[in-house]
Image (cartoon, rainbow, N blue to C red):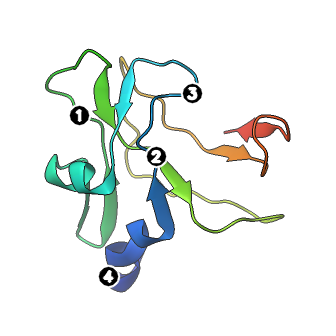
Amino acid sequence: MASISESDSFFDAFNFFADSDPTYGFVQYVNKATATNQGLIYTQNNQVRIKTYNTTTTETGRQSVRLVSIASYNTGLFRLDLEYIPTGCGTWPAFWMVGPNWPNSGEIDV
């Protein structure tokens, strides 16, 4: 579990993808300000919380968060410690690891 300083600064390590879904999914990715205002991202009890908007949909789908790491990695072990993974319609929790020239340099989806 992240310490308080780590959880409070967690989102600073990411850019928020807020463009149309390149895979044409029924989703509306939102920026950091919208995600914060809608309660889609927050920290609570030293934990990072990320969720989808589950009240209404728009013409382009439900609001959701897609984070893109600011740092680049050539090797490493990636660990995700989850207390809860959402299930149901419209959820797709995943790591998308892509090369510098996606899609030409490939991807690994976890």
Disc with the residue nearer the chain's start (2 vs 3): 2
Please tell me which residue is depicted at 48% across the width and 30% down the height of the picture.
92
**Quick check: marks 4 and 1 in contact, CB under 8 Å?**
no
Whether 17 is drawn above or below 10: the answer is above
Residue matched to label 3: 22
Cα separation between marks 2 and 1: 16 Å
Given residues 53 and 31, the one toward you in this image is: 31
**Quick check: marks 4 and 3 in contact, CB under 8 Å?**
no
Tell me if residue 1 can be seen: no
Disc with the residue nearer the chain's start (4 vs 2): 4
Tell me the amino acid under the disc marked 2: Phe
What label does residue 53 carry, if any? 1
Element at badge 1? loop
Element at badge 3? loop
Residue 68 coordinates in the image, percent (x, y): 54, 53
Q: Quadrant of residue 98?
A: top right
Tell me if residue 48 can be seen: yes
Cα separation between marks 4 and 2: 25 Å
Disc with the residue nearer the chain's start (4 vs 3): 4
Residue matched to label 4: 4
Residue matched to label 2: 17
Disc with the residue nearer the chain's start (1 vs 3): 3
Q: Nearer the viewer, mark 4 or mark 3?
A: 3
Residue 81 coordinates in the image, percent (x, y): 51, 58
Tell me the amino acid under the disc marked 1: Tyr
Tell me the amino acid under the disc marked 4: Ile
